[in-house]
């Protein structure tokens, strides 16, 4: 895929990700607010289904953010999806009262989902997600396309490897066949390990005779009785 086509798909992915992220964040905030209201009324945890639903929405949001920040996707995807969220989150952090007033002017801003959007703006979740997406678009490696000849080593896309060059020994080194070991001694006979009478193994000089008898015989020169 050419670099231009990759960026075009990135633009499309970024545009589609804006409503998807908005829906996941607002619906997740709605379920969190509902869970908190149940706890405030009953001082008990809500149903397990509500908790799993909140968990699933948060995991789905994180998965979508990770896909937009992937190295195979054009950085325009994370840039386009993150810029609006970063702007809304930054405005809510700097001017929270004005942000709530602007939110009330939107259609449905005074209903339940308006309260959920206000919760997201106050909590800083929108600012965090927008900052992650926006800053993930700046590494230069994401803007460069993969070259045509680039491929991972030891993969099928790498094709056949070049044959290794024939090895030749250094000058002056004798060639030895694969089944023949080089001589260990140059023109010399290997030392014999045979035991000679009265001598040491290997043909060395004979050692001193071992004394006979016990300690009494060695000391007084007589035979032990």
Image (cartoon, rainbow, N blue to C red):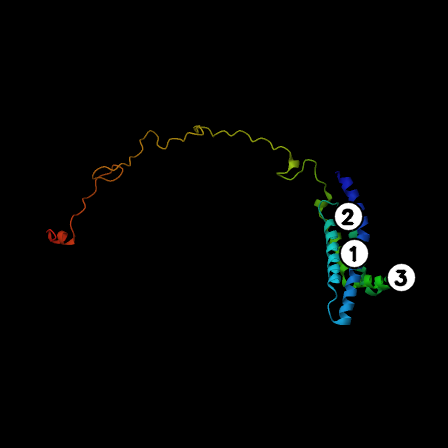
Q: Quick one: 19 or 213, which is closer to the camera? A: 213
Left or right, 165 with respect to 215, comes to right
Labels 1, 2: front one = 1
First in residue order: circle 3 vs circle 2: 2
Upstream in sequence: badge 1 or badge 3: 1
Residue 95 is at least partly visible in this image: no
Residue 26: x and y, percent? 80, 59
Cβ atoms at labels 1 and 3 below 8 Å apart? no
> In the rendered image, which residue does mark 2 sit on?
77
Residue 107 position, x and y percent, is 89, 59
For the point 77% across and 50% down, which residue is it?
Answer: 79
Instruction: Give the crowd class for mark 3: few <14, some 14-19, many >=20 residues within 10 Å.
Output: few
Residue 103: image location, x then y, percent: 86, 61
How crowded pointer 1 is (Cα within 10 Å; few <14, some 14-19, many 20+) is rated as: some
Q: Residue at x 64, y 36 (%)?
A: 158
User: Which corner quadrant holds the N terminus?
Assistant: top right
Element at label 2 = helix
Marks 3 and 2 sit apart, C-alpha to C-alpha, by 29 Å
Measuring from the top left, give residue 152's x and y in whole percent: 64, 40
Instruction: Work out how far the residue at label 1 is from the one at label 2, CA to CA, in angstroms.
Output: 17 Å
Of the numbered discs 1 and 2, the one sitting upstream in the chain is: 1
Q: How many marks?
A: 3
The residue tagged 1 is 24
Q: Which mark is residue 33?
A: none
Q: Does the residue at mark 1 contact the one at mark 2 (Cβ under 8 Å)?
A: no
Q: CA distance from mark 1 to mark 3?
A: 22 Å
- Disc 2 crowd rating (10 Å Cα; few below 14, some 14-19, many 20+) is many
In the rendered structure, find residue 105 and report the number of the disc placed on it: 3
Do we see residue 6 in this rendering? yes
| Label 3: which secondary element | helix
């Amino acid at each position: 895929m050419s670099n231009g086509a990759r960026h075009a798909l990135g633009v499309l992915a970024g545009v589609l990700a804006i409503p998807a992220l908005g829906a996941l964040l607002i619906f997740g905030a709605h379920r969190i607010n509902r869970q908190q209201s149940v706890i405030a009324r009953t001082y008990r945890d809500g149903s397990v289904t509500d908790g799993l639903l909140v968990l699933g929405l948060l995991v789905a949001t994180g998965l979508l953010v990770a896909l937009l920040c992937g190295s195979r996707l054009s950085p325009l995807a994370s840039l386009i999806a993150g810029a609006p969220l970063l702007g809304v989150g930054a405005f809510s952090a700097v001017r929270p009262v004005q942000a709530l007033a602007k939110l009330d002017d939107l259609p449905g801003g005074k209903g339940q989902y308006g309260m959920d959007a206000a919760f997201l703006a106050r909590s800083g979740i929108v600012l965090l997600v927008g900052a992650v997406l926006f800053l993930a678009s700046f590494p230069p490696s994401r803007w460069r396309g993969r070259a045509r000849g680039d491929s991972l080593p030891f993969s099928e896309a790498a094709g056949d490897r070049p044959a290794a060059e024939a090895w030749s020994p250094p000058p002056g080194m004798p060639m030895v066949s694969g089944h023949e070991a080089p001589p260990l001694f140059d023109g010399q006979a290997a030392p014999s390990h045979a035991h000679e009478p009265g001598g040491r193994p290997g043909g060395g000089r004979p050692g001193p005779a071992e004394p006979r008898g016990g300690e009494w015989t060695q000391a007084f020169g007589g035979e032990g009785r």
